[in-house]
Image (spheres, rainbow, N blue to C red):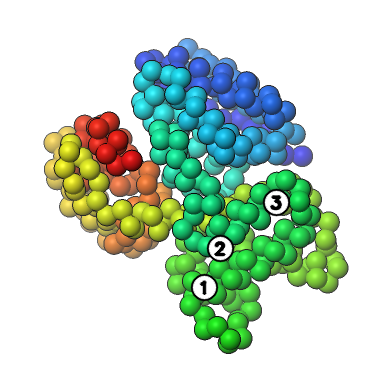
Amino acid sequence: MTSDLELTFTASARLYQDALGFLTFLRKAARKHSVTISFSVDQDGEFKLSVPGKECWDLDLFLQEIIFQHGLYYYLCTVSNRREVARSVVKPIFEDLLVSRFSVAYPVQLQKHLIEGSSGWFGGEFLDGNAQAYEVLFQKLKLKMISGYEFIRNLDDLLTEFMLTHLEHPKGEQSPKFNVLVDRCHNQNILRVAAAPKLFKRVHALRTRGLHRLEREIPDAEINELAQNVYYVFEWQDDYRRAQAEKTVRLTGKRYRRVRYGDEIRTWPKRSCAEDTARWKSLRGEWPEIISRPCHDCGVLQGELHLWGCDMEVCPRCGGQYICCTTCRTEEDDLDES
């Protein structure tokens, strides 16, 4: 049995009532999916949220459904300071819920989804044709139109096609074995999500066992977790392509080139804060080693643009953390970008 889920969140005194209101909304909405969300709060404003382990698989479906039905967006339409509540209350709480349930979670479109009601989470709007095909397959599984093994069999074929396409394998030539394809995609940075190679190989192993009639009755819990994790792999791929295409941002009515991963250190001297300046000096010697690895938050490589919502991206105007920059990024800028 899955263990109980327990999470903690801290809200500032100013946003205490907003956090309380959002958690109350989640608790009521979750009841329709047979999920019991309970929470408490101490005098320091720390909320403790819990869900019984036996209900965690229902929680997965609830998290998906509330996104697909734009529940978070409609909730925020009912609060007065919705942009601040979205950024400082709803987004961090909901992200932690996603990460607690899915081993691969890159909800980088969440902010736009909350503010604009963007449907960028839907596979039908993915740029990659294989990702769109996977969304259809994913929905068939959820609607119980196909069995767990049928899902695995079709997914194995889809992943093979996805890898052959991105490796630009010549049509008509014999393709390498599945696990070789996975390793090549990983080595060529096509599969950036750390868990993706193991995830893809698990799908193929289940398909192979089914072909040899060793294992066709796969537990629903395992299928559901695997399906959601594959979804997030495709979502990351899509977010990556969109991020590389968005080379500028609008700040205080002007256009600025976004800062690429590895160039952040050039902007830090702009900061007036003594603490930030000291941190910049201490990191200067370590910087080449840091950027030799993928970004710790969004996984891009040196020279690439961060995914939307990455905590490493810096504001090209002031050099501060872009995701939290309210000085340079105004509501009018956000509206112009939409």
Q: Secondary structure at mark 1?
A: helix
User: In the rendered view, does 307 fall on the left or right side of 197?
Assistant: left
Other residues around mark 3 within 10 Å, as few (<14) / some (14–19) / many (≥20): some
The residue beneath circle 1 is: 165
Label number found at residue 140: 3
- Identify the element where label 2 is drawn: helix
Q: Secondary structure at mark 3?
A: helix
Amino acid type indicated by mark 1: Thr
Q: Contact (CB < 8 A) between labels 1 and 2?
A: yes
Q: Which residue is at the front of the view, 153 or 47?
A: 153
Q: In the rendering, at what x and y percent does residue 314 appear?
A: 26, 45
Q: Amino acid at mark 3?
A: Lys
Spatial CA distance of label 1 from label 2 is 9 Å
Label 2 to label 3, Cα distance in Å?
Answer: 15 Å
Label 2, on which residue? 130
- Callout 2: few (<14), some (14-19), or many (20+) C-alpha neighbours within 10 Å? some
Residue pictured at 52% horizontal, 84% vertical: 170
Instruction: Please identify the quadrant where the N terminus is shown.
Output: top right
Residue mark closest to the camera, 3 vs 1: 3
Whether residue 302 can be seen here: yes
Q: Is residue 179 left or right of residue 287?
A: right
**Residue 65 at x, y percent in the picture:** 61, 37
Residue 268 visible within the image: no
Spatial separation of the CA atoms under disc 3 and disc 1:
24 Å
